[in-house]
Amino acid sequence: IIFIPCLCGSAPCLLCRCCPSGNNSTVTRLIYAFFLLLGVGIACFMLMPGMETQLKKIPGFCEGGMGSSIPGVEGHVNCDVLVGYKAVYRVCFGMAMFFLLFSLLMIKVKSSQDPRAALHNGFWFFKFAAAVAITIGSFFISEGPFTTVWFYMGMAGAFCFILIQLVLLIDFAHSWNESWVEKMEEGNSRCWYAALLSVTTLNYLLSLVSLVMFYVYYTHSDGCTENKIFISINMLLCVAASIMSILPQIQESQPRSGLLQSSLVTLYTMYLTWSAMTNEPDRKCNPSLLGIIGLNGTSPAGQGRVVQWWDAQGIVGLILFLMCVLYSSIRNSSNAQVNKLTLTSDESALIEDGPQTDSFEEDSTLNRAVDNEKDGVTYSYSFFHFMLFLASLYIMMTLTNWYSPDSNYEAMTSKWPSVWVKISSSWICIALYVWTLVAPLVLVNRDFD
């Protein structure tokens, strides 16, 4: 019974006895991440094969479903909208609007003393009800141009989220490298140096294997010119970025830069290149994974090809999405450049093992979260919600494989705009990483410590 009022209260009272005590800022972000992941689970559920058939078995539920021929029993729900890509668009629309609304409401919140901070950190029952209401309401939006307009909105938002993924990836790589270098200096340097070298080598090896497979399966001697150009350009850019990261001038101004970060960026760029090629309309240059491993042949190209759910690049994209959202919720970065890009302070903290007892009322029977934002927020509330808004659009495009609905909304097909959005994002990702290397040399009057 004690948790019922907590649903209307703040994040601290949502911690159960088995959970470790932690900071209010971290607990709140984890709960919002749970909201997003719950929406992703519902969208995935709507994509399950045979879902529409099962819904039509409910008497009087679907238009044209079971019981429609019985007098007085008529289905009023268009089950085509409740399942498939249309359902994904509407579920993600509801999540996106929820987070966009909070992003606007939380602009310029400076500390937890702001009345809006109470809305951000509490009232979870009402916020959950609001998110559910917005999502359900999205299913009543008339079809019209909604799907097409939201598709292009999704592409733009997903493009931005890909860039945020890279920023967080660089942040993770810097933190990883710094942690292992510190352990090398503390003792047993050979062991940690071998671990650092092994991970870096593994990343480059995976990138090299990916590169070879791209040339073998996604190019042909008599065609696929675009793929050849994409693969070659990204290969050269990754090599150049890796060499640049170990130049003496870069090492002098950026001691933390190294091949570990470059290897992760290279591997991520290979993923973006592969993801772009899997959206090519020409099936000769875009074989399915099952076709590559020999379980079936490559299907011929055709207009109006029905979307193939749960393909390989979609699953990898979903995994990266989960890692990015969870990491952004618990990140504790000392990278000043990344903190500026994500509007985060240097004191954004992970769950602590021993919170100070003078910052909250001591309770021996219930773990609590510490309000560590009375003097100032440790992250931008508005930017965090905006990032989840972009994440909602990214997951929408990932679950629908970036396919575009045809003019009759009966099928989804690959389109070149999706290819160019992904491949251009890979180039911008490398440019962002290179900028983090050369910025201290270009802007000599700025402090990058």
Image (tube, grey):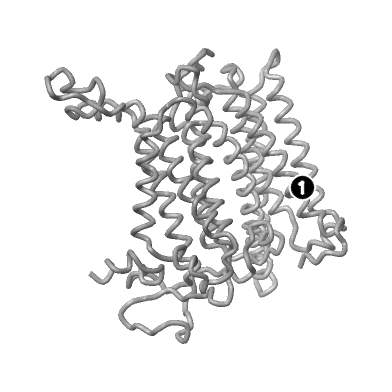
Q: Is residue 231 left or right of residue 1?
A: right
The residue under the point 74% across, 26% down is 229
The quadrant where residue 106 appears: bottom right
**Measured from the top left, where is residue 71 in percent x and y?**
12, 20
Number of marks drawn? 1
Of residues 232 and 12, the one drawn nearer to the viewer in this rendering: 12
Q: Quadrant of residue 118?
A: bottom left
258 over 142 or under it: above or below: below
Residue 331 image position (x, y, % from top left): 56, 62
In the rendered view, tell whether residue 147 sits above or below residue 204. Answer: above
| Amino acid residing under circle 1 | Ser
Query: Relative to residue 374, is residue 336 depicted above or below?
Result: above
Q: Is residue 103 left or right of residue 409?
A: right
Q: Residue most toward the left?
A: 71
Q: Secondary structure at mark 1?
A: helix
Quarter of the figure that contains the C terminus: bottom right
Disc 1 crowd rating (10 Å Cα; few below 14, some 14-19, many 20+) is many
Q: Quadrant of the N terminus?
A: bottom left
From the top left corner, tell me how far across and down residue 279 is, in percent.
57, 26
As rendered, which of 377 and 235 lies closer to the eye? 377
The residue nearer to you, when weighing 378 against 184, is 378
Q: Quadrant of residue 366?
A: bottom left
Residue 347: x and y, percent? 60, 71
Which residue is drawn at the image coordinates 47% and 35% (left, top)?
Answer: 399
**Picture residue at 77% right of the left edge, 49% below the top:** 434
| Residue identified by numbered label 1 | 242
